[in-house]
């Protein structure tokens, strides 16, 4: 876990950032945590089980479930003095949706999130682009193709090779069980419609396209916010400041 205290004398609230497939807390530390700390928020970024940097997990990551990830997030939230704003990216956005089945939070931001209707469309598109990845799926391995095609699948703008290599070195393995749970979920509404939810997508996302983001927004009775010239990794792509500005303005509009 990474913590960055509010740089303002008056703390506006607490944000908990939740990463997606094969990532970790590090992906928020680069841009988003400094941005929101400077604007008055205490910032936490979790490392989901099996995603801790430089550590070998004591369990086979392939058997970890979305419920294990949700429990990890709740364990952190349970230590906080107030309900946080949850910001989830990709699988992290799906984790937020499952979290809200049991637990409340102040607000939620879903960035390029796996939709409540399932990620099977995104998976089929990926396989069509990369047919050899079927062999990885047979071996219960989503880590290999995710790492191999990270540049083309996760980013829109040019990423310098040294930066891309640094990101790849930080990427971890991922649970095949959790991946299967993303494909055809059944989300039970509870706190979802009791809090403000911002649904954001990237216009150039190759994984979750505009239709996916629109389905998510419709489920939560809101409109999608799409960011132009931005790829799936919205917090790391060159348009990250535009993404952060949109989130911050939404927080102000909702007095959060």
Image: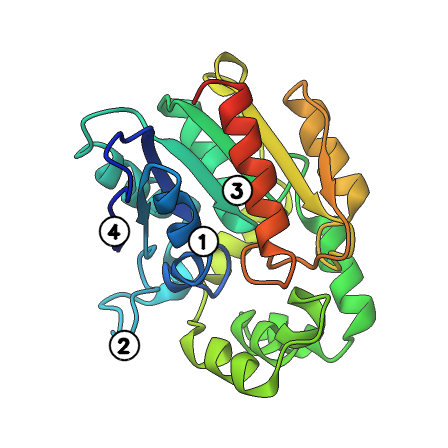
Label 4 or label 3, whichever lies nearer to me, is 4
Quarter occupied by residue 82: top left
Give the residue pinned by disc 3: 93
Q: Secondary structure at mark 2?
A: loop
| Mark closest to the chain's N terminus, 2 or 3 | 2
Q: Whole-Å distance between the Cαs marked 4 and 1? A: 14 Å
- Please tell me how crowded label 2 is: few (under 14), some (14-19), or many (20+) other residues with Cα within 10 Å: few
| Mark closest to the chain's N terminus, 2 or 4 | 4
Asked if the residues shown at circle 2 and circle 3 are in contact, with their CB atoms under 8 angstroms apart, the answer is no
Give the residue pinned by disc 2: 54
Q: Whole-Å distance between the Cαs marked 2 and 3? A: 24 Å
Q: Secondary structure at mark 1?
A: loop
Which residue appears farthest toward the front when viewing the image? 9
Q: Whole-Å distance between the Cαs marked 4 and 3? A: 20 Å
| Mark closest to the chain's N terminus, 4 or 1 | 4
Quarter of the C terminus within the rendering: top left
Label 4 or label 1, whichever lies nearer to me, is 4
**Residue 251 image position (x, y, % from top left):** 50, 27
| Mark closest to the chain's N terminus, 1 or 3 | 1
Which residue appears farthest toward the top when viewing the image? 194
Give the residue pinned by disc 4: 3
Residue nearest the observer in this picture, 81 or 5: 5
Relative to 108, is 228 above or below? below
Residue 19's disc number: 1
Residue nearest the observer in this picture, 158 or 118: 158
């Amino acid at each position: 876990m990474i913590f960055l205290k509010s740089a303002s004398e008056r703390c506006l609230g607490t944000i908990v950032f939740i990463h997606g497939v094969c990532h970790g807390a590090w992906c928020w530390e680069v841009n988003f945590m400094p941005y929101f700390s400077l604007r008055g928020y205490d910032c936490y970024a979790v490392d989901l089980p099996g995603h801790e940097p430089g550590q070998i997990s004591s369990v086979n990551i392939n058997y970890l479930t979305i419920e294990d990830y949700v429990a990890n997030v709740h364990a952190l939230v349970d230590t906080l003095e107030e309900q946080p704003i949850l910001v989830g990216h990709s699988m992290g956005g799906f984790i937020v949706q499952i979290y809200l089945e049991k637990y409340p939070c102040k607000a939620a931001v879903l960035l390029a999130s796996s939709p409540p209707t399932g990620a099977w469309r995104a998976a089929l598109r990926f396989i069509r682009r990369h047919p050899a990845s079927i062999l990885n799926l047979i071996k219960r391995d989503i880590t290999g193709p995710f790492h191999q095609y990270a540049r083309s699948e996760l980013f829109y703008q040019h990423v310098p090779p040294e930066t891309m290599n640094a990101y790849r070195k930080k990427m971890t393995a991922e649970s095949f069980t959790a991946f299967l749970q993303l494909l055809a979920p059944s989300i039970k509404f509870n706190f979802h419609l009791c809090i403000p939810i911002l649904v954001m997508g990237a216009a150039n996302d190759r994984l979750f396209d505009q239709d996916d983001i629109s389905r998510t927004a419709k489920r939560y009775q809101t409109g999608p916010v799409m960011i132009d010239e931005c790829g799936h990794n919205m917090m790391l792509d060159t348009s990250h400041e535009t993404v952060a500005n949109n989130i911050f303005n939404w927080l102000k509009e909702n007095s959060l």
